[in-house]
Amino acid sequence: MIRANWTLKRVKLLCTTAAIAACLLIAPAHLLSQAPTPTPTKIEGVINDFSPSSTSPSGAYHVNGPWSLQWDPSGKADFTASLTMVRPHPATDTEADRNFHTHHIVVTDGKVEVVGTTIVVTGPALITASGNSVFAGSTVRVEITGGNTLSLSNMTLTFGGAAATHFTDQPYNGVVKVR
């Protein structure tokens, strides 16, 4: 009788241990398969606008180039733009008067807010002029909006800080590429 009772306890212990081990092996795999995988959202397009006539050096510029926004569900986004600027109607048609130059704008880990149907990204920007770093301490604001047919169709890029002395603080308009 003692031996049978001991064997029964041993079988119960073995079954309980096996059940716990199975739960420990199956549960993590099940939880991992159920956990949502955060996938970044990439939005891109083209900026194509004219700067205000108050742009420095003086005169309106045609501003054009591609932009890209990599938005992570964590609430951060990386933004890049590669822009060309050239005066469309200079006093004389010389290279110096047209003042063709390039700018690259990079925002890393910008703050993302969704305001109604508008995606707003703000943050400090690394800005170059023809490959040289300029406008240290500048910020940018990117707004992506849309309508009832295309929820994301338009974007604006606005400069703050030292960059506003060159680009002004007026927004530059662009389009979202439809996929």
Image (tube, rainbow, N blue to C red):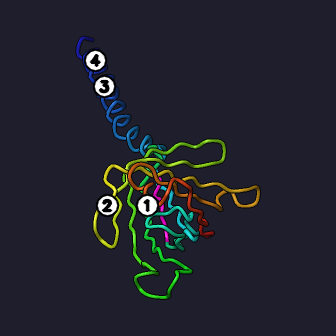
Q: Nearer the viewer, mark 1 or mark 2?
A: 1
Does residue 131 appear left or right of residue 105 in this picture? left
Report the residue marked by disc 2: 134
Report the residue marked by disc 1: 166
**Alpha carbon distance from label 2 to label 3:** 76 Å
Report the residue marked by disc 4: 4
Does residue 149 appear left or right of residue 83 in this picture? right
In the image, farthest residue toward the top: 2
**Magenta-drawn stretch, dominant element (helix, strand or loop):** strand
For residue 11, the mark is 3
**Alpha carbon distance from label 1 to label 3:** 81 Å
Q: Position of residue 62 (x, y in %)?
A: 54, 74
Q: Earlier in the sequence, mark 2 or mark 3?
A: 3
Q: Nearer the viewer, mark 4 or mark 3?
A: 3
Amino acid on which disc 3 is placed? Val
Magenta region: 66-71
* Residue 69 part of the magenta-drawn span: yes
Q: How many marks?
A: 4
Callout 1 touching callout 2 (CB < 8 Å): yes
Does residue 169 appear left or right of residue 13 in this picture? right
